[in-house]
Image: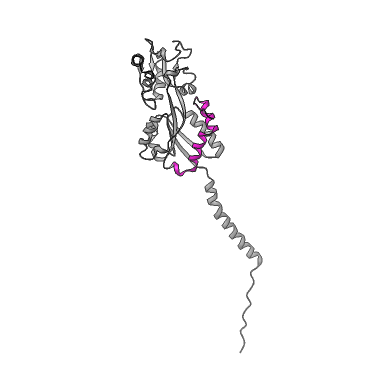
């Protein structure tokens, strides 16, 4: 009988082993790279709020994006124009006063916890007058003179602010005198701005100083005397969605930091302590 000799096993060439190892290595590298790449993709923060603080908020958003690579999309204007979108995707909501923020807490249907609201900066009530100040208005007391036509805003963070100013000294005669001179009570600042444009016979517009800073050709600014001066803030709050975004917390910190404060100061906000 012939013995059947087993064939010796053929060694795998070293080049083939190297190729297999290389392919495996590339696969592992790709497997590790994809999540890392996705993790580095900048988030887009969705921010909503009123038009008054918007110039400062938008400049701060651009500066934050430049510093971090995280885009901040700021949608601003009268609340009815954005509240539905905010309920769907807002990470942060900012306000034009404490009363306005309280309204937003209710309007967002449980998405904002009032304990998370952070007041940022104050600005004073001011008197806007026509360029050149033809009525020679020098302060709040001049608004009480017979025949002066005054525009106020009743809503959007300014509910009754003229009454707060007129009633500061506890004299009902001041409230009565101002009331006689008020010719219109639009519900938000944007409507008031349009009325100021459409009715050039209006002499004075009681509103926050920041509106003159952002509309320098429409009006000049006259300070309200300290005894009658009112301050209200802009604040910001994360939504339940935003609290899951580390970048939302970072943006809030940026707004409160020196760079954010410098931006808000340029737009007329009070930033003592920075």
How many numbered markers are drawn?
Answer: 0
Give the quarter of the image for residue 156. top left
Pick the residue in front: 44 or 230. 230
The answer to whether 18 appears left or right of 183 in the picture is right
Residue 113 screen position, x and y as percent: 39, 39
Q: Give the main secondary structure of the magenta stretch.
A: helix
Q: Is residue 191 above or below residue 17?
A: above
Check if residue 256 falls in the magenta segment.
Answer: yes
Instruction: Name the quadrant of the N terminus.
Output: bottom right
Residue 224 screen position, x and y as percent: 44, 18
- The magenta segment: 242-270
Pick the residue in front: 233 or 82. 233
Q: Outermost residue toward the bottom? A: 1
Q: Is residue 249 above or below residue 77?
A: below
Residue 271 screen position, x and y as percent: 51, 28
Q: Is residue 136 above or below residue 216?
A: above
Give the residue at x 46% y 34%. 74
Residue 221 screen position, x and y as percent: 47, 17
């Amino acid at each position: 009988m012939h013995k059947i000799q087993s064939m010796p096993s053929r060694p795998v060439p070293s080049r083939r082993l190297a190729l297999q190892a290389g392919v495996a290595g590339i696969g592992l590298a790709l497997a590790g790279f994809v999540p890392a790449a996705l993790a580095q993709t900048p988030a887009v923060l969705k921010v909503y709020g009123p038009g008054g603080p918007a110039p400062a908020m938008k400049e701060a958003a651009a500066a934050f994006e430049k510093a971090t690579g995280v885009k901040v999309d700021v949608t601003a204007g009268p609340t009815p124009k954005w509240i539905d979108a905010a309920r769907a995707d807002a990470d942060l909501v900012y306000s034009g006063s404490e009363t306005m923020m309280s309204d937003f807490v209710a309007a967002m249907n449980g998405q904002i916890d009032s304990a998370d609201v952070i007041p940022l900066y104050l600005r004073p009530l001011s008197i806007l007058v026509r360029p050149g100040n033809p009525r020679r208005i020098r302060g709040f007391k001049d608004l009480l003179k017979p025949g002066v036509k005054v525009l106020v805003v009743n809503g959007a963070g300014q509910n009754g602010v003229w009454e707060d100013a007129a009633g500061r000294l506890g004299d009902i005669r001041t409230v009565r005198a101002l009331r006689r001179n008020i010719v219109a009570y639009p519900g938000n600042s944007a409507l008031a701005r349009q009325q100021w444009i459409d009715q050039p016979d209006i002499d004075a517009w009681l509103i926050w100083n920041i509106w003159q800073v952002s509309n320098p050709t429409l009006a000049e600014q006259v300070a309200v005397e300290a005894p009658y001066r009112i301050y209200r803030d802009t604040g910001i709050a994360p939504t339940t969605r935003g609290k899951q975004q580390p970048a939302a917390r970072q943006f809030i910190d940026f707004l409160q930091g020196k760079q954010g404060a410098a931006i808000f100061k340029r737009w007329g906000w009070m930033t003592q302590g920075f």
